[in-house]
Image (cartoon, rainbow, N blue to C red):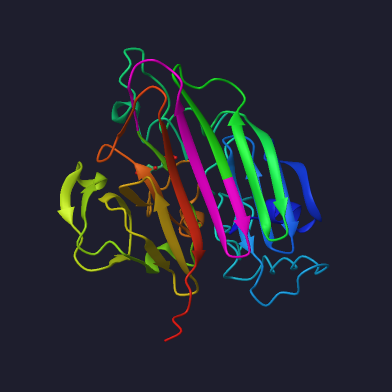
């Protein structure tokens, strides 16, 4: 579910190209395997839509845009100039993105080298910096595009050094079955460093207050809306309003919004963050638009910080795929 202006850029793409959207350079693909949009600010995937399993492969034209005035696809408020949201993709992007140097809310922002504030991570005496770290606002360079018949693999690195001892890189793989994002941190310095972070996935949903996240039953979590009180998840999670939780879990999760079942697998992550702001969304997003996302994040948080020693690497990953229908 992405703003109409971004959906148009995707629709107008044949193969691969670069374009500008909301003042950022973005990389677009519209191929037989599906659609992908990545912002070079933050190496942030903004859009992913795999082709339907029965789609004709080569030469098939891109799917037409769904009617933006359709009730299910429109998240604009009467009387505002907010763009319509176009349904279909697996990720959500705000129709009212902040101007640069702000970060785009939506898609899969890379929170690095800390999740939330820097007190969860880097213990160097000069630590300071923005919420969720500098990586999501920084310019990244597209180092390589590996194309193959079934999909694409992108490699990105920050244009400038973001940390004295750590170097991150991102790998994005997309094909007709899945979207996979990796954030790899390499320690090139001399003293151990503690990191946290997140692949802060904004998953598009029909109605955030009518979703079910399976796979967390019995897990303990920190409730950020109750001063980090520790609680146990009773049964599967049904989202009915605002929540901001850090689950201690490495389990594969399933998100069901009544129209689509997505698998959310995570690598190198023992924290699953589930966030929905309810009726108090951040300033850059309306209540109505926010109703169409649920964040299910692959994270390292205060529950599972990673100590990296010189020469070591850490991989934080997430894989989104369609829930397979049981064949038994
Ligand atoms: O507004 P942002 O800096 O993008 O953060 C958005 C959200 O990220 C995470 O999911 C946190 O758990 C939330 O507490 C926070 O509000």
What is the span of residues highlighted in magenta in the rendered image?
Answer: 172-195
Quadrant of the picture in which ligand 1 is shown: top left
Query: Is residue 242 in the magenta section?
Result: no
Of all residues, the one furthest to the bottom in this rendering is 328
For the C terminus, the image quarter is bottom left
**Residue 28 in sight:** yes
Q: Nearer the viewer, residue 113 or 173?
A: 173
Name the residue: 46% across, 53% down: 287
Q: Is residue 175 rendered to the left or right of residue 227?
A: right
Query: Is residue 187 in the magenta section?
Result: yes
Q: Which of 5 and 254 is in front in this view?
A: 254
Q: Is residue 6 rendered to the left or right of residue 286?
A: right
* Residue 94 pos. (x, y %): 55, 49
* Residue 316 pos. (x, y %): 43, 42
Q: Nearer the viewer, residue 208 or 124?
A: 124
For the N terminus, the image quarter is bottom right
Up-down relation of residue 245 to residue 169 (above or below): below
Name the residue: 38% across, 50% down: 277
Q: In which quarter of the image is residue 50?
A: bottom right
Name the residue: 63% across, 58% down: 84
């Amino acid at each position: 579910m992405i703003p109409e202006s971004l959906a148009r850029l995707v629709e107008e793409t044949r193969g691969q190209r670069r374009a500008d959207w909301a003042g950022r350079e973005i990389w677009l693909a519209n191929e037989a395997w599906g659609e992908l949009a990545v912002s070079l600010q933050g190496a942030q995937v903004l859009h992913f839509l795999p082709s339907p399993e029965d789609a004709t492969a080569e030469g098939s034209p891109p799917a037409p845009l769904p009617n933006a005035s359709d009730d299910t696809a429109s998240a604009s408020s009467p009387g505002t100039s907010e763009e319509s949201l176009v349904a279909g993709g697996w990720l959500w992007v705000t129709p009212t993105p902040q101007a640069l140097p702000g970060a785009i809310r939506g898609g899969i922002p890379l929170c690095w080298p800390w999740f939330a504030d820097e007190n969860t991570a880097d213990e160097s005496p000069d630590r300071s910096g923005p919420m969720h770290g500098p990586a999501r606002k920084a310019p990244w360079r597209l180092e390589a595009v590996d194309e193959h018949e079934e999909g694409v693999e992108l490699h990105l690195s920050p244009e400038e050094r973001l940390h004295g001892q750590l170097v991150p890189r991102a790998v994005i793989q997309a094909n007709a079955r899945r979207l996979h994002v990796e954030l790899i941190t390499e320690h090139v310095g001399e003293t151990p460093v503690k990191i946290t972070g997140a692949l802060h996935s904004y998953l598009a949903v029909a109605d955030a207050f009518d979703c079910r996240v399976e796979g967390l039953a019995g897990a303990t979590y920190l409730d950020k809306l109750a001063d980090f009180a520790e609680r146990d998840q009773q049964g599967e999670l049904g989202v009915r309003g605002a929540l901001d939780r850090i689950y201690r879990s490495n389990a594969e999760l399933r998100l069901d919004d009544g129209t689509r079942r997505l698998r959310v697998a995570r690598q190198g992550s023992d924290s699953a963050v589930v966030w929905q702001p309810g009726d108090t969304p951040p300033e850059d997003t309306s209540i109505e638009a926010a109703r169409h996302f649920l964040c299910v994040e692959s994270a390292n948080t205060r529950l599972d910080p990673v100590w990296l020693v010189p020469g070591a690497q850490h991989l934080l990953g997430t894989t989104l795929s369609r829930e397979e229908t049981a064949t038994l």
